[in-house]
Structures are given as C-alpha cells and as structure tokens.
Image (cartoon, rainbow, N blue to C red):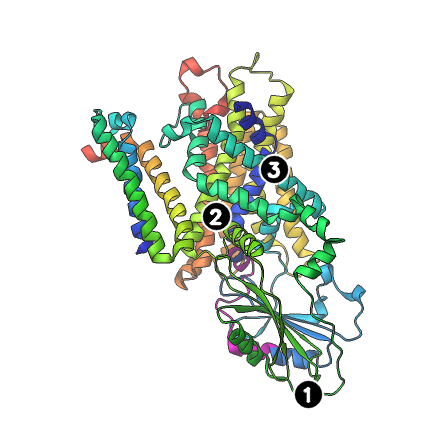
Amino acid sequence: MAWLHTWAGLLPGWLLFVIFLFGTGAFFHQEISRWMRPELGRGTVTAEAIDAAAALLAHKAPDAEQWRLSLPSARDGDPLSISWKARDEKPAERGKRGRANKANRATLDPATGRELTVRDTSGGFFIYRMHFDLHYMPVIWARYMVCIAALAMLVAILSGIVTHKKIFSDFFMLRFGKGQRSWLDAHNVTAVVALPFHLMITYTGLVTLLFTLMPWAISANFSDRDAYFAAAFPPAPETEPSGTHAAMLPISALLQRGEQVKPGLHVGSVTIRYPGDSEAIAEMFMRSETLGGRREQVRLRATTGEVLGERPARGPAAATQQVMIDLHAGRYAQTVLRWLYFLSGVGGTVMVASGLVLWTVKRRAKLPDPNRPHFGFRLVERLNIGFIAGAPAGIAAYFLANRLLPIGMADRTDWEINSLFIIWGGLFIWSLARPAKRAWIEALSTCAGLYALVPVVSALTTPRGLPASLLTRDWTFVGFDLIMFAAAAGTGFSAWKVATRQAKTPPARKRRAPLEAMA
Amino acid sequence: MIHAATFILALAGFASLLLAMPRHQQDWLHRKLAPLVSQRLRLVGFALIALAFLAACLGFGWAYGAVLWFGWLTAAAALVVVVNLNRERIVAQMRR
C-alpha cells in the first residue's frame, strides 16, 4: 500500500503545498492586515469613534436608505468603516460584490474616529482566501480542486500511518547529512510530531467545504441552494419606511442594547435601514471569538431599542460544524495557541515539501542515466522548484508591493496580488532555464533576499519600521518584521545547504545527485 | 504559568520516552538500560504527558485546554527532536 501514500501525496502535492503555505500564513491574517495598513493606529474601537462615525453618517447621508457600520475586533487589522446606500441608488451603481462605491464609504481610525486615508489592499484577507479559493479562476473550480486535494491528503495521512508503522519507532529520529535518509527523517518527523494537527486540519478543512463536497443534503431537501440559505438563515422581513421623521437612539446606545440582549457576544457590524424614519431598524451581526462560539443576528427598532426578532437557535449538527470550522480557522485562539497553530502549520508545509523532494531523491539514485532523467522525473523536479521556492517568494513580493506601489494607483489592490504571481511566475520560468541544482540555489536565494527586504523597505517607506515599533512596543509589527527575517534566514540557509552539500558528500554516494543533499 | 507547566510536563514526558528507547539509550548513556527500567521510563513518559493534559485542561477548560495540549505536545516533541539531532554538539559542550 506504500504506492497509495506515494501517489495520493504526489499528484495533489503542489496544490497541497500552496494550501498549507497560505493556510499557515492565514492563522495570522488579521495581523498581516494590520501590517499592510500602516496608516491605521493601534487600539480597539472607542465610544468616541462610534459617535464620530454616527455624526459623519448623519452629515454625509441624512436621507440614505441604509447605513452600515463595520466594527473591527481588537485583533482585526481593519479600520472602522462606514458606508451608505442612497434611496434612489440602482444596483448597477454598486461596486464589486455589492460593495458601496468609493463615494459612499469612509474609513475611520477605530481609536480616535478621525477620517483616514488607508491604502487600498486586500491585506491578510487575500492570504486567507487564496488558501481555499486560489486566484484567477472561478471560485467553484478552485474549491473542487481544493476538496480533491484535501481528500487525497486525508488518504495520504492515513495510508502513511498504516503502511509506514516504523514512523513511531523512529519518532525522534532526525539525522542530517545522510542524503535520502535525511529527507525521509524530515518527512517523518514533521508528519509525526504534528500528526494530531495534520489530521484535525485536513478533516476540519473538508468540513468547511462540506456543501461543495456533499451537496446532496441540500439538493434532496430544497429546490435550490438559495432556498436552503433562506431556510437556514432567514432574511429579515421587508419593511417599508413610514415617511414620518422620528429621532433614533444614538448608534452607541443601540450597540449597547444589542450586547445586553446577547451577553458575551460583540457586534461585528450594524446596518440601519431608513435612518431617521419612525420605522428605522437596526440589524446587528454579533459573534463571539470562542471555540464553537455563536454567530447571531439581532434586529432592533432603532427609535426605541425594542427587540424585533432573532434568528432561531441553531441545531446540534450546525453547532458541531461550527466547532469544526472554528478549530480549523483558529480565530478563537489566543496569542500562545495561535503561535502553536502556526508552528504546526509550518511543520505541515515542510512535511508536504519534504515529501515532494523525497520523491525525486528516491528515484534519482535508480535512474538509468542520472544526467538524462526521463520526462516524469524532470516534471516533478521542476514543479518542486517552482512551487517550493517560488510560492514563498511570491508572498514576500506581495508584502513588498504593499509598501512600494504608489498609494493612489488605480486597481492597487489587484496589482498587489498580481505582483505575487508575477514574481512567482518569473522565478518559475527562470528556474526552468537553469540546471536543477543552480535553479534551487538561485530561487531560494531570491526568496531569502525578498524576505530580508520586506522589513527594510517597510522601515524606509513608513514611519513604522522595526526600531520604531520596538520603541513603541508595537508587538504586531515587531513580530511581523522578525518573521520576515526568520523566513529570509530559513530560505537562505536552505540555499546555502544546497550550495555546499555536494563537496561534503562521501565518495561512495557521489553518483547520487545534488538534490538529495539539500537536507 | 499554565502554558509553562503544560510545556515542561510534555517535554519531560517526551524526554522519558526518548530514553526508554534502546537506540537512544546507547547514544545518550552509552549503555542499554535493563528492560524493566526502560518499561518504567516509558510509563513515566506517558504519565507526564497525561499530567500535561490535566494541567492544560484545568487551566483553560476542557475544550480549549485539549487543543492547547496538542499544540504544546508538538512543540515539546519538536524540541526533543532538535536536541537529539544536536546530541554530539551538546555532549561536547557539556564536557568542556
């Protein structure tokens, strides 16, 4: 059954590497967003800022059909943002995904309520979305691909445990400088040491895509997907404005009221329909950042604070699903546990990468002519270089683009993302044109150089470089910059190892190729 | 505090498990321990890991504690692996 482990791991391996790499980064997506919006101050939403937001809404859009206010949580790297919809606005005037267009929104500093110009960026949210929606392709295709890769991953993990029982007697074995054996050790150790994490993350990952993978529960009971969503998450009943003016409670009082009704939950966003009308309604989306925590929607009469309706409590199956999704996303995790998630994620990424490299190392020794490997071997080898060294380099380029692209640039958000793929693709093509060993060294060194540049460029282009963040004890920024240096050190060390290993290889093994020496 | 307790218990647990394995006894102690001693070391190792679970759960609740326990187990096992990897360097340092 060893073949099952080999092929279930290899075929989706490069996609799995991307999923693991971006997923590991996504554990810190809020912190990444924070770093990518350096204009935004620190601190949580204050009552003062909410009052300022309410005043701004009343000033800019007194006759709007609806107001919307998004409140970032303490960790979110998002600004306090407000938007509004004019009464006569046509759907065509809305931006992407029904977002309010630029003239109809504003961003505010969550601490002071001052209006801010924040650079356009997808921030950490892109890292998170890329983890399961990929990019440049319809989301539904991406999700099917990710589902199949995750299923194969589950098969690979389980078949790995069953067929390679020796992994447990070799639990602590990691020996460097022993060629193929070292690659096997690295693959085993990163797999076994974080095995509970790998099983959990793969299984719960499939649960997050439950209805993509198993749509039949919906299709057997509902006429279509929309009917299911309408039943599972009933939309608010349509109401009409009365046309008579009436004073609303202040937004801050409405928020307080919501938190009284649902103790322990905090408001993520609030929409006020027909502000200023006697029939004005405040709809609040509330959540708690705990494992399996509730997400609730509360509707209040905006003039009195009277509760109009709540979503029915969820059933046990939905609650179980929520726990699994929370376990997967780890948003409930406090700082220490979040770092442990990250550490295990790094282990998973290394496990996938070492498994891919192991495939070539194992076969290189058996090639009839090591200088002229067959097509399949070359394909795997090239994909390995392009993905394992290329994708991390792309992420570094994404961060660099965030600091270097002009603030007022058109489609800036898209160009940040394009930069990621331009660097990744460029490195991929470059590595194709070079001999395998040189390609590894050059791609990994480029990757290291890009990561090392991120904190430097950040210090030169923003007032929030590493020395400044250390002085102000801004640990999110300090942590981000240090992780960039750590990534540079890690990839640089790998490049150095590939470059120097050849000389040290004992003569008997000389026939074996340089790649295995990368340990 | 609870984080430190969980981690140290897990670390001691994995260290005991390492020393319960004959091939590592040869490396670290230059001799093989008697089977009975190895067996007891293994038992102690698992007991320490179970204690780490209790520490995490009593400190953070059963749900959060259980996840945290797995996280610290991974960290502790990884550290034992790294120490074992650098055994020769560490032993040389200690002799000096």
Amino acid type, callout 1: Ala
Classify residue A325 as left or right of residue B24.
Answer: right
Mark 3–mark 2 distance (CA, rounded to whole Å):
28 Å
Secondary structure type for disc 3: helix
Q: Is residue A353 visible?
A: no
Q: Chain of mark 1?
A: A
Tags 2 and 1 on a common chain: yes
Of the image marks 3 and 1, the number of the one nearer the N terminus: 3
- The label shown at residue A149 is 3
Amino acid type, callout 2: Met
Is disc 3 in contact with disc 2, using a CB cutoff of under 8 Å?
no
- Identified at 65% across, 33% down, the residue is A429
The location of residue A397, given as percent across then percent down, is 58, 46
Of the image marks 3 and 2, the number of the one nearer the N terminus: 3
- The label shown at residue A246 is 1
Q: Chain of mark 2?
A: A
Q: Chain of mark 3?
A: A
Toward which corner of the image does residue A81 lie, by quadrant? bottom right
Give the residue at mark 2.
Answer: A484
Tags 3 and 2 on a common chain: yes
Q: Which tag is nearer the camera, tag 2 or tag 1? A: 1
Toward which corner of the image does residue A413 lie, by quadrant? bottom right
Q: Is residue A447 visible?
A: yes
The location of residue A62, given as percent across then percent down, is 70, 81
Q: Nearer the viewer, residue A118 or A152?
A: A152
Q: Magenta residues? A: A31-53
Q: Which tag is nearer the camera, tag 3 or tag 2? A: 3
Q: Is residue A51 magenta?
A: yes
